[in-house]
Amino acid sequence: MFLVVFRNRKRADIDAAVYDAEAARMEEMAASQPGYLSFTSYTAEDGEVIALSEWADEQSARSWGAQVEHREAQRRGRESYYESYTLFACADPRIHHFDRSKN
């Protein structure tokens, strides 16, 4: 598995409806990519966002990052949406899982 963590803060002056529509389109496109496993996003009370995507392997994640429409969305993000962001990428993360219903 390959894990991508996108940690970001949006600018105060963004058009939230436009951003949300583009984010929904990107999520839909990502889900159709080979190797896509999952995506989820969390927003903290202070506005920081953590978006997690899981991929079968690094090549799948990199292929998604190279998609033309996704590259354009990344450019718009830097120009119009984000105050700051950090992207973390991790191959074969150590995983610990607990599920009370299975114990």
Image: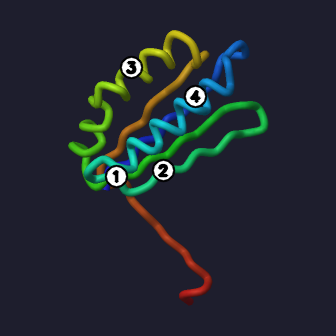
Seen at 58% across and 18% down, the residue is 81
Question: Does the residue at mark 3 contact the one at mark 4 (Cβ under 8 Å)?
Answer: no
Q: Earlier in the sequence, mark 2 or mark 3?
A: 2
* Label 1 CA crowd tier, 10 Å (few <14, some 14–19, many 20+): many
Query: In the depicted view, which residue is nearer to us: 25 or 37?
Result: 25
User: Rounded to the nearest whole Å, what is the CA distance between mark 4 and mark 1?
Assistant: 21 Å
Q: Residue flagged by tag 4: what amino acid is it? A: Asn
Numbered circle sitting on residue 39: 2
- Quadrant position of the C terminus in the picture: bottom right
Left or right of 82 in this view: 56: left
Local secondary structure at mark 4: strand
The reply to whether the C-beta atoms of the residues labelled 3 and 1 are less than 8 Å apart is no
Instruction: Using the image, tell me which numbered label, if any, was put on residue 72.
Output: 3
Say what secondary structure mark 1 lies in. strand
Residue 11 figure quarter: top right
Mark 2 in CB contact with mark 1 (< 8 angstroms): yes
Q: How is the image coloured?
A: rainbow
Real-space Cα separation, disc 2 to disc 4, in angstroms: 15 Å
Under mark 3, the amino acid is Glu
Discs 3/4, front: 3
| Marks 2 and 4, the one that precedes in the sequence | 4
Looking at the rendered structure, the kind of residue marked 1 is Tyr
> Closer to the camera: disc 2 or disc 4?
2
Asked whether the beta carbons under mark 2 and mark 3 sit within 8 Å of each other, the answer is no
Image disc number at residue 36:
1
Q: In the image as oriented, which residue stretches furthest toward the bottom?
A: 103
Q: Which residue is mark 4?
A: 8
Mark 2 residue element: strand
Amino acid bearing label 2: Phe
Gap between marks 3 and 1 measured at Cα: 20 Å
